Amino acid sequence: MVKQQSDSTVNGKIRCDACPVMCYIADGKAGACDRYANVGGDLIRVDPLTIIENTVNEGGKVVSFLPGTEGEDWDGDLVQAKRSFVTAVGAGTTYPDYKPAPFIVSQTERGIDMVTVVTEGIFSYCGAKVKIDTDRYLGPEASPVRVDGEQVGHVTTGEYGSQMLSLGGVHHLTGGSKKEGRVTCDALLRLCNGEAVEMQIEGGAEVTVKAGAAPIINGVEEQRMRVGCGSATIGMFAKQWAPHVDEVVVVDDHITGVLSEHQAGRLLDVPSTGIRIKGRRSTPGRYFQVAEPGTGWGGTNISDPLSILGDFDPKAAYAGLRMLMVSTTGEQYGYYILNAELRPVLQTDLPEPIRFSVDQIAENCEPAVASVLFMGGAGGSLRAGVTRNPVQLTRSVKEALTYVSCGGAPAYVWPGGGITVMADVTQMPANAFGYVPTPALVAPIEFTMRLDDYRALGGHMEAVVPIEEALKVAERRVAPRDDTRWPTAGENFKWRA
Ligand code: SF4
């Protein structure tokens, strides 16, 4: 665990100055955020400093997968600079920020001197963008999202096959009541640390979100992310359907598709069937607003698909006409044959080719997952812990000379001013996030660049230490998540000529 400096002790209590709360911590006790403790008179960062080791274990043998060294035996030396990345998880925070960041470590990578500045940033301006793979209606756009009765965010514009939530942000963290800020901070902390959080959407559903897991909507675990909208589904499967049915309707809250009218049906010479759809016709074979949004067929509120049909036109329809109605995930389907009155009659047996195509819709769906991206702005004073001239860091990031990561996870840096980043929380080590009661989220952030560039941007050169110093105090070593790569010389950098 990392020992922190403290400038003040009163009656045996150490003052922690890692955030504006400035706790006085008695021996054996922790501060208000549980991140710092007084251990025998030393101020200690409780969570271990975390290192990511660039090794994989194949058949019990640890091998390197650094580019160019694949398959080479690893000599077992953990303290090899080029194979380790010091994350900010457990590194601690400096406050106020003019002090150098807790760790500024140098290492040589392929003959090039690199430096990584790590700090656990205190983010009052931060939140989470949540993507929930489902067609089901979660609630009206801009509807408040609540946790324990407090608004922590809102429903934002939906995306293709996913509903989106925007959570946190400075207004909920600091602009509302004390309870709203506390609940928002706690919800963000749990979400970012991979825990499940139950939310209520005003005028909509109860949702449980856990990063990387299937979302639970109104108590039911979502299974599938739709194959596409109703129109796209017609396009994808029209060839399979045309020889075996006369009509197909793919029910979708966004765009309901109708085979006989759709361009795909026209090209396959599917004749008109006299079908009438209740909804707003957009273009041939594509209908909007066939029903209200909901948790039924294709994200609509219907449980009976026939409710979106008008009477068949007797000029084109005929008894014996075969029709498939299916949702965009293939979870709901019905096979009908028109009777003498031109009314669809549900058939109990699905012809084998039709069953096959319905199964293929399901097969082409992906597992429904909730994704959580941490989003925060490091454009403020945090930069001063990196350099005496903060705007130089922003410029260096924008010029791609400095690579930004969060707990080793690649961070997407937004264009425009400041250093506003987004990172996938599932790509970070477990429990990478903390909080302080101001309230604000504490998130790991690392800046990696060439040592020459660090010097040029006015970095705290006097605070640079070899990586071995950090490795000595690191107590937690983790493997990279998936194919996440932290910056190495020659990758991720724009090299100057
Ligand atoms: S809340 Fe945590 S970081 Fe802030 S002063 Fe107290 S112990 Fe230190």
Image (tube, rainbow, N blue to C red):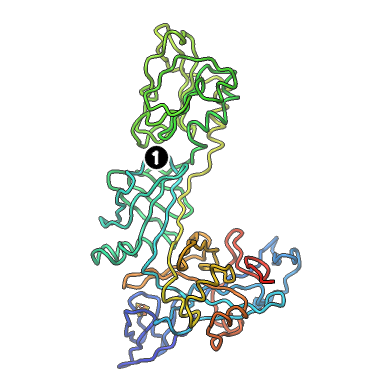
Give the percent coordinates (x, y) of residue 162.
45, 45
The residue nearer to you, when weighing 258 against 457, is: 457
Indicate left or right for 191 with 80 as reference: left
- Label 1: how many Cα within 10 Å (few below 14, some 14–19, many 20+): many
In the figure, 337 relative to 422: above or below?
above
Give the percent coordinates (x, y) of residue 309.
38, 20
Instruction: Identify which residue is drawn at 37% across, 37% down.
Output: 295
Quadrant of the rendered image containing residue 60:
bottom right
Instruction: Identify which residue is drawn at 75% across, 67% down.
Output: 69
Which residue, given by chain and number where applicable, does mark 1 sit on?
136
- The amino acid type found where label 1 is placed reads Arg
Give the percent coordinates (x, y) of residue 137.
37, 40
Extreme residue in the left direction:
177
Quadrant of the displayed image that contains ligand 1? bottom left
Instruction: Identify which residue is drawn at 51% across, 20% down.
Output: 260
The residue nearer to you, when weighing 153 against 305, is: 153
Instruction: Identify which residue is drawn at 70% across, 60% down.
Output: 59
In the figure, 456 relative to 266: above or below?
below
